Image: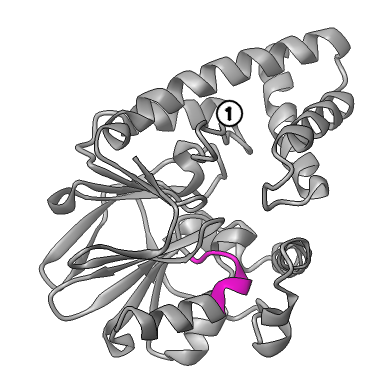
């Protein structure tokens, strides 16, 4: 079952943000952690949800970056300014990327582009949401445990969607937070998201498939619970296999990455015109994905 409306999930877990950009608040015994950083323009939504859901902001001591793409780190600068003692966790590669001037410029540019696309530019003028160099935090890696007032979650390195992607599993809640590393549950389908390295993406899915999961918390288009959550990774594995085969077939016909990237972007836009990313951003994503697949097809 897919749930796309923000609200309380269980006693100690909240879905915050908006349907297209989800973050989660996990509460431990004496402190809370925000999981993922969403799009920048959801800041007003989150501040209102703190009030509507009676969330005690003083308990929020930690924030976990699942990967460093612009649509997953947008609220972090604002929250860090609001809570100077906020401890931010991310992979070594995520921190490396978030110190690059080019990456920071991309975060800010793409954030503005998407805010304009969905009619939320007002948030960017009302609040200072720009990323700037200087944010830092704690580096985490495979097998690390984050403790939260008696509640523990384990880190899994799951590259492929991005080189810095991690997933977070909380066994006690049977909850998995894979960000985009498990595919995106849009509508009634699953988008394969092997953006940076499709081969690693598929391998990461295989690593996640045997975890005990009753809740799968996606960063876009809500969370999934029950039987669908239990089977989501296995379904995503199949969707990824089928999509890769489709892309390989298209590439064989032309041998031109740019032509195929444009073709699959146009097809996607014609079917999923309400998707939050702009066509230009989607074309860049598809180009990156295709370069890896084309290289893999050509061999060493």
Q: Is residue 45 magenta?
A: no
Q: Quadrant of residue 101?
A: bottom right
Up the image or down, 241 lies above or below 7; here it is: above
Q: Which residue is nearer to you in this view: 72 or 292?
A: 72
Looking at the picture, how far across and down is residue 174, in whole percent? Answer: 19, 46
Does the image show residue 201? yes
Residue underneath mark 1: 198
Q: Which residue is nearer to you in this view: 222 or 68?
A: 222
Up the image or down, 292 lies above or below 223; here it is: above
Residue bounds of the magenta highlight: 37-43
Q: Is residue 41 magenta?
A: yes
Looking at the picture, how far across and down is residue 180, in whole percent? Answer: 50, 45
Does the image show residue 299? no
* Kind of element beneath mark 1: helix
Residue shown at 74% from the left, 68% from the top: 119
Residue 273 shown left or right of residue 4 in the figure = right
Residue 4 shown left or right of residue 298 in the figure = left
Residue shown at 71% from the left, 51% from the top: 277
Residue shown at 38% from the left, 86% from the top: 51
Quadrant of the drawing holding the N terminus: top left
Q: Quadrant of residue 131?
A: bottom right
Q: Which residue is nearer to you in this view: 158 or 244?
A: 244
Residue shown at 22% from the left, 79% from the top: 31
Looking at the picture, how far across and down is residue 230, in whole percent? Answer: 26, 33
Quadrant of the drawing holding the C terminus: top right
């Amino acid at each position: 079952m897919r749930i796309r409306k923000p609200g309380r999930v269980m006693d100690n877990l909240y879905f915050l943000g908006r349907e297209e950009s989800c973050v989660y608040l996990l509460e431990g015994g004496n402190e809370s952690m925000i999981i993922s950083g969403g799009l920048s323009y959801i800041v007003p939504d989150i501040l209102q949800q703190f009030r509507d859901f009676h969330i005690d902001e003083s308990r929020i001591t930690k924030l976990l970056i699942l990967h460093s793409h612009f649509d997953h780190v947008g609220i972090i600068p604002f929250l860090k300014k609001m809570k100077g003692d906020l401890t931010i966790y991310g992979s070594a590669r995520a921190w490396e990327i978030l110190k690059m001037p080019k990456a920071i410029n991309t975060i800010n540019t793409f954030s503005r582009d998407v805010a304009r696309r969905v009619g939320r530019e007002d948030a960017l003028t009302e609040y200072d949401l720009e990323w700037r160099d200087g944010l830092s935090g704690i580096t985490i890696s495979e097998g690390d445990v984050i403790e939260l007032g008696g509640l523990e979650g384990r880190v899994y390195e799951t590259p492929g969607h991005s080189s810095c992607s991690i997933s977070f599993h909380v066994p006690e809640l049977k909850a998995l937070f894979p960000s985009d590393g498990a595919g995106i549950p849009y509508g009634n389908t699953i988008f394969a998201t092997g953006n940076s390295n499709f081969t690693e993406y598929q391998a990461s899915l295989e690593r996640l498939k045997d975890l005990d999961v009753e809740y799968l918390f996606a960063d876009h288009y809500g969370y999934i619970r029950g039987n669908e959550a239990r089977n989501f990774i296995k379904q995503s594995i199949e969707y990824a296999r089928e999509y890769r085969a489709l892309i390989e077939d298209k590439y064989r016909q032309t041998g031109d990455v740019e032509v195929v990237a444009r073709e699959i972007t146009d097809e996607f836009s014609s079917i999923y015109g309400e998707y939050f990313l702009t066509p230009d951003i989607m074309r860049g994503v598809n180009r990156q994905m295709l370069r890896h697949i084309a290289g893999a097809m050509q061999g060493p």
